[in-house]
Image (tube, grey):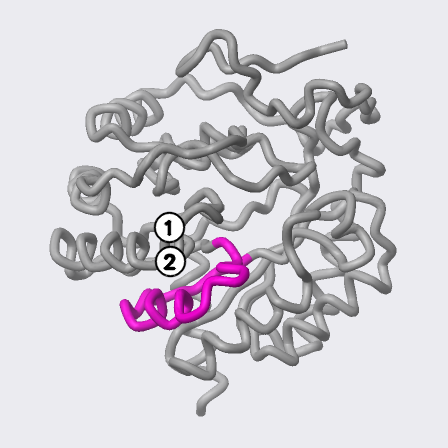
Amino acid sequence: MVVIVDTISNPLRPRHPEKVNRPDSASPPKPDWIRVRAPNTRGYADTRNIVRANGLHTVCEEAGCPNIGECWDKKHATFMIMGDTCTRACAFCNVKTGMPNALDAAEPHNVGEAVAKLGLAHVVITSVDRDDLTDGGAEHFAQTIRAIRAACPSTTIEILTPDFLRKEGALEVVVAAKPDVFNHNLETVPSCYLTVRPGARYFHSIRLLQRVKELDPTIFTKSGIMVGLGEERQEVQQVMDDLRSADVDFLTIGQYLQPTRKHHAVMRYVPPDEFSSYEKVAYTKGFLMVSASPLTRSSHHAGEDFAKLKAARAASAR
């Protein structure tokens, strides 16, 4: 049995206390198309130093993203605001769970400073879930967006938000800050929610994305799912239809990778040709942009994809 322990903030506290007593879940060996190089470049080190110097967290590290070496070498980092501890306990996620600390009032400013130091033309901001806050952290998101605008007026901003479940008025606060892209991931198909994402509600997430477009049609909307969690192909296609009914512009599909044996097992490694098929089907359903590959993640190549997204919208308006 393997127990993951957080040895950084508290040497006695497991990183995922709710998973400690779960039986181990074995996944099949990774195929060749999943393997990536270990990060060891100068660019990676420079990015890490800037993140550390500003006292920030990144989802790249906390979630164990396989693309961290490639992205950080280019000084592309996805900042994770509102702390490093999540109030949810999703079966797929490696972010630490528990009761978070109070919000850091200086964090929005520090994020803006880090974005300026990295020279980012496009930045992605995500967060842990903060069910303990009355607004779910909506105002903190808005303050962070405004701080980035002040520090880097030309930088485009993409946010990847929690679902703000039962947080009335929270979404309106975030949308009013006018991010360029509003991303909220569905993560998986509805039939897997009970075991994979038990704290969330599928149709609430669909409605959240739909509401963004109702509040501000100029904001691009985006969502993503993982495959390899036991879903069926027709279920993935139904998710595509549900997202298009909410007028979502951009869909990402990537392979689920098990962080530890205490997390949900990988049921299947989906081969690259199936991802290509999903991408073709998604485009026929009307998405402006689709990224589907084994290593696709929400913020992977986000800057380049945003440029393509703008071009696609302009072309469709002609």
Residue 155 screen position, x and y as percent: 23, 57
Q: Amino acid at mark 1?
A: Val
207 relative position to 109: left or right: right
Judging depth in this view, the residue of 51 and 81 nearest the camera is 81
Circle 1 sits in a helix, a strand or a loop, which is it?
strand
Q: Residue at x 74, y 47 (%)?
A: 227
CB under 8 Å between callouts 2 and 1?
yes
Label 2 crowd (10 A; few <14 / some 14-19 / many >=20): many
- Residue at 78% in and 67% down: 237
Q: Which residue is mark 2?
A: 158
Quadrant containing the N terminus in the rendered view: top right
Query: In the depicted view, which residue is nearer to us: 107 or 314?
Result: 107
Answer with left or right where residue 90 lies relative to residue 145: right
Against 98, residue 244 (above or below) is below
Q: Residue furthest left?
A: 150
Callout 1: 10 Å neighbours few (<14), some, many (20+)?
A: many
What's the residue at 43%, 53% (across, down)?
302
**Total numbered circles:** 2
Q: Is residue 69 magenta?
A: no
SS category of the residue bearing label 2? strand
Q: Where is mark 1, residue-wise?
A: 124
Is residue 176 on the magenta stretch?
yes
